Image: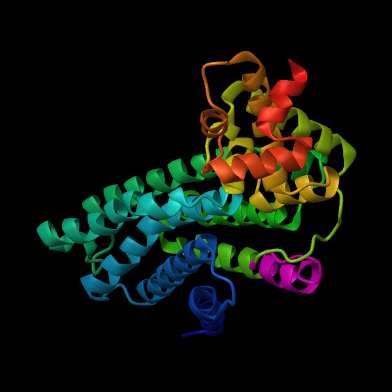
Amino acid sequence: MDTQYQILFFFAVLGAFNALFLSSYFAFFLKHRRNANYFLSALLLAIGVKIITSVFLYFDAGLSEAIVETGFSANAVIGPFFYLYVRSSIHDNTKVKTYWWLHIIPAAIAIPVIGLFYPSTFSYVNGPTVLSQYVVALIYFQWFVYLVLAAIILKRSFGKVFQNRFRSNDEETWLVSLFWGIGVFWIGPIVTSHTTYMVGALSFSIIFYGLLFLWIFKFRRTSGFFEPHVKYATKKIDISEAETLSIQLDQLFKKEELFRNPDLKIADLAYKLHIPSQRLSQFLNDNMGKSFSRFINEYRINAAKEMLLQEDQYTAETIGYECGFNSKSTFFTTFKKLTGHTPANFKARTK
């Protein structure tokens, strides 16, 4: 093996090792657990397996079909895991946890099923087979679809990063940068010949670890991206973005009356607004000066006051439930706290 191939082999194996190491770190060693971290761990694991199998196949086309098949399987789940990672990072939605297998299982079992019925598909002794080329094309098409889905979720973040309309936070900058890294990983094998298909994996390794080190040394001091935020890097969101969020929130509550849902969570509201939960919490706490529960309860109490004045056939308890409170005592306590009166006293004083 000459020097050129030795260097290529070294950096490829190093990239694979780092991916596997970081996969373990995000899965087992972070103090705080988030769905996004687990999806990032799985993504890095798939990338590491993909790179290492690509490296050995590049230098030894006579590898066993099982190893080649493993590399194909890893390649098939990169797109789904990247999409799930982006979705859970932006929306922080617990629903992702319940349906993630719908994206992963089909991709994970497709390759073993093909290998079971057509075992010669993954034999590269005489070069790639016709069927393997079709499988590769299908994997990369699937990968493209998931990149598009991730881009849709990141649409607002793209605008903030590239247009400077709003100030992007570090997590959004990271996700957009990672998107381009995955894009390079996807397009590398497509634009190069099959003899240099490792270029995608190597390019991604360089981009990803460059971004990671940049994050560690530049951004980590002021952001808790990989772990929940304890303090905001900057307190108030800038005026233009705050005004936009305020208008969007008011329109959303008037149109959909989300406050009537007693189980409404900040993650659900952030999902509707297409922003991270932390960003919405920062806006409510620092720009509006109120907690999420206070914000929701104000809408509930305003709706309750209207019903108390207009609906004589409903009891105060029923009105409380209609407006999103899950108990009579909570409704009465919150009403008194925000208005200074009980529901009955308020109704009597205003009629």
* Nearer-the-camera pick, 184 or 96: 96
- Residue 328: name its quadrant: top right
What is the image's colouring? rainbow
Query: Is 346 located above or below residue 174 in the figure?
Result: above
Q: Measuring 79% from the left and 64% from the top, which residue is drawn there?
A: 231
The image position of residue 302, as x and y in percent, is 70, 28
State which quarter of the image contains the C terminus: top right
> In the image, is residue 222 part of the stretch drawn in magenta?
yes
The image position of residue 4, as x and y in percent, is 56, 79
* Nearer-the-camera pick, 322 or 99: 322
* Nearer-the-camera pick, 103 or 12: 103
The image position of residue 348, as x and y in percent, is 71, 22
Q: Which residues are magenta?
A: 210-227
Q: Measuring 37% from the left and 72% from the top, which residue is drawn there?
A: 53
> In the image, is residue 314 part of the stretch drawn in magenta?
no
Q: Residue furthest right?
A: 239
Q: Measuring 59% from the left and 27% from the top, which residue is drawn there?
A: 257
The image position of residue 62, as x and y in percent, is 26, 75
- Residue 317: name its quadrant: top right
Q: Measuring 58% from the left and 48% from the top, which residue is drawn there?
A: 267
> In the image, 12: left or right of 109?
right
Query: Is 241 located above or below residue 78 in the figure?
Result: above
Q: Residue furthest left?
A: 117
Q: Is residue 37 visible?
A: yes
Q: Is residue 165 visible?
A: no
